[in-house]
Each structure stands twice: as C-alpha cells, then as structure tokens.
Image (spheres, grey):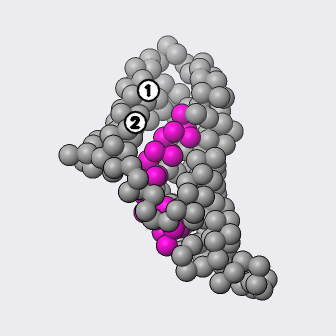
C-alpha cells in the first residue's frame, strides 16, 4: 500500500495502529525508566531530546532495514556495550554523597546528559522487541505513517518518564535519587550481561 494513495482515515489508522502497540509495549519498559531516572537527577530537556533523537534514528533504521538490523552487530557485542555503559553510570551514581546536595542536578552539562541519554537508549533499544515490531509493521503497513506513529508513541512514553522523574525529585532528596538510580542502572547492567554469556 502506497503512502500517497491513503485516504485520511487510512492515514489515521496507519498512524494509530503502531502508536497504540508501541505505546503499550513501552510503558514501564527500560527506556522509559531510563528517562525517568535521568530526569530525576538532571535537567529534563536534554533527557527528552536525547531520547527523541535516539528513537528517531532507531525507527528510521527499523523501517528502512527491517528486523535484520540487529544481525549486523552481534547481540553479544551490543549487550556488552549496554552492560558497560549502565555499570559505569550506576557506579558513578552510587558514589554520590549527601553533602553533594542539590548541586548534583546541575553537575552535568545539557550536552553531556543529552549524549548520555542518547547512547543509553540507542544501544539498549537497538534490536529490541519494539524496533523489530516497528520493522514488522512497516512491512505490512505504509512506511511513513508507521514511522510517525512509532515515534509519537516513544516520545510520549519518554515524556511521561521525564515528568515522573521530575516529580520524584520534589519528594526524594537528590543524593538518595542518585543512589536509587545507581542501583537501577547496575540491575540493568546485570540483565544486559545475561545476553553476553
């Protein structure tokens, strides 16, 4: 089915189908939790922008290359890279002391947290079930609406994670959030390692 030949209703259906599927699949998924954790500790705009750019690229790769993308890079190498990245971030977070106080939220520059968010989500989500699902939908539905719907869903879940993270910041001391996020990232690193061995 060609994108240009779709009626308005066809476009709406082709956008909302991937939106609904991806939105439900990503609620509470690791990418949303990463956004929530980072936004609780850093400025929210770089986190949201980093996640958005990562998802735009991942979904573009998914609709262009299909599910075969993850076969280009061995899963073990991807999993090892994710594990190392999460472990480093986890250890650095656990080293935060109470004396650091609220200054910790501005420690990292906007550029730094943008890159951190981008790398974490890009590496963690490459070849993930969501990317494969987007590739599958792009093979049966018009490509452009699938790309739009999937991106809208992922940006929405990321934004929800950022909002939740900012609310946590108001209720929990920043040094405690650093410790919680450190444990969370180490757990994610452990899960990633299970794919290496």
Kindly state the secondary structure of the residue where label 2 is placed. helix
Residue 69 or residue 147, whichever sits in front: 69
Image height of 95 relative to 153, above or below: above
Say which residue label 2 marks.
Answer: 86
**Is residue 124 shown in magenta?**
yes
Residue 150 visible? yes
- Left or right position of 67 against 52: left
Q: In terms of image quadrants, where is residue 102? A: top right
Residue at far left of view: 197
Mark 1 Cα-neighbour bin, 10 Å: few <14, some 14–19, many ≥20: many
Mark 2 Cα-neighbour bin, 10 Å: few <14, some 14–19, many ≥20: many
Residue 152 or residue 62, whichever sits in front: 62
Kindly state the secondary structure of the residue where label 1 is placed. helix
Image height of 9 relative to 50, above or below: below
Say which residue label 1 marks.
Answer: 93
Magenta extent: 116-136
**Is residue 194 shown in magenta?**
no
Residue drawn at x 65%, y 28% is 111
Q: In terms of image quadrants, where is residue 22? A: bottom right
Residue 59 or residue 66, whichever sits in front: 66
- Left or right position of 179 against 105: left
Q: Distance between the residues labelled 1 and 2?
A: 10 Å
Residue 166 visible? no
x then y, percent, for residue 175: 48, 25
Residue drawn at x 61%, y 35% is 114
Q: Nearer the viewer, mark 1 or mark 2?
A: 2
Magenta region's main secondary structure?
A: helix
Q: In terms of image quadrants, where is residue 183? A: top left
Residue drawn at x 42%, y 23% is 92
Image disc number at residue 149 = none
x then y, percent, for residue 158: 59, 51
């Amino acid at each position: 089915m060609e994108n240009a030949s779709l009626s308005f209703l066809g476009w709406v259906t082709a956008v909302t189908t991937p939106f609904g599927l991806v939105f439900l699949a990503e609620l509470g998924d690791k990418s949303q939790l990463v956004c929530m954790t980072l936004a609780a500790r850093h400025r929210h705009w770089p986190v949201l922008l980093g996640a958005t750019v990562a998802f735009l690229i991942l979904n573009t790769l998914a609709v262009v290359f299909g599910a075969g993308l993850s076969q280009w890079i061995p899963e073990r190498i991807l999993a090892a890279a994710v594990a190392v990245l999460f472990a480093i971030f986890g250890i650095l977070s656990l080293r935060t002391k109470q004396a650091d106080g609220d200054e910790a939220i501005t420690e990292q520059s906007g550029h730094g947290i943008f890159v951190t968010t981008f790398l974490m989500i890009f590496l963690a989500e490459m070849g993930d079930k969501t990317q494969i699902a987007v590739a599958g939908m792009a093979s049966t539905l018009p490509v452009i609406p699938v790309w739009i719907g999937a991106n809208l869903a992922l940006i929405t879940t990321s934004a929800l994670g950022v909002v939740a993270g900012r609310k946590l910041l108001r209720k929990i001391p920043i040094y405690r959030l650093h410790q919680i996020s450190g444990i969370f990232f180490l757990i994610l690193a452990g899960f990633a390692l299970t794919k290496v061995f």
